[in-house]
Image: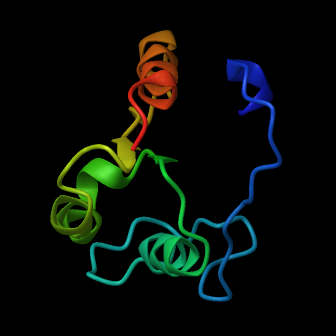
């Protein structure tokens, strides 16, 4: 994704032993979500000024929304983008991501 939106960097992909090889084991409406656990750990281990989390399940994951609201309430350090299952990432989503990344620092 980074090269497609003009970002030149080596981006990490987060994984977990607690998921299927594809990363998807079907929607599980539970408080545990390996992706939330992975991003919390990654941000604790490697703090960043800004991050963008793009996932079609974000709107259905209250735990992730609660964590974000509590930890990143200022809206400066993170951006959640919950894409539509059937359309995926849209040009408007990409514009919002680019605006966020290029916006005010800190």
Q: Nearer the viewer, residue 81 or 8?
A: 8
Q: Can you see residue 78?
A: yes
Horizontal and vertical percent for residue 10?
83, 48
Count all numbered tags in the image, as a single digit. 0
Q: Is residue 91 above or below residue 9?
A: above
Q: Can you see residue 54?
A: no
Report the side of 15 relative to 26 (left or right): right
Q: Residue furthest bottom?
A: 17
Query: The C terminus appears in which quarter of the rendering?
Result: top left
Q: Nearer the viewer, residue 29 or 14?
A: 14
Report the side of 24 relative to 90 (left or right): right
Query: The N terminus appears in which quarter of the rendering?
Result: top right
Horizontal and vertical percent for residue 47?
54, 68
Horizontal and vertical percent for residue 48?
54, 58
Horizontal and vertical percent for residue 4?
75, 21
Q: Residue at x 38, y 53 (%)?
A: 57
Q: Is residue 44 above or below residue 96?
A: below
Location of residue 80 (image quadrant): top left
Q: Residue at x 73, y 19 (%)?
A: 6
Q: Is residue 31 above or below residue 24?
A: below
Q: Nearer the viewer, residue 105 or 85?
A: 105
Q: Residue at x 29, y 65 (%)?
A: 64
């Amino acid at each position: 994704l980074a090269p497609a939106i003009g970002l030149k960097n080596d981006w990490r992909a987060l994984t977990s032993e607690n998921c299927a090889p594809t990363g998807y084991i079907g929607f599980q409406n539970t408080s545990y979500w390996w992706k939330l656990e992975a991003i919390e750990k990654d941000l604790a281990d490697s703090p960043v000024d800004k991050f963008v989390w793009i996932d079609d399940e974000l709107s259905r994951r209250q735990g992730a929304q609660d964590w974000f609201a509590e930890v990143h309430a200022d809206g400066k350090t993170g951006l959640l983008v919950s894409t539509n299952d059937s359309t995926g990432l849209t040009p408007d989503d990409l514009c919002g991501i680019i605006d966020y990344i290029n916006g005010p620092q800190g």
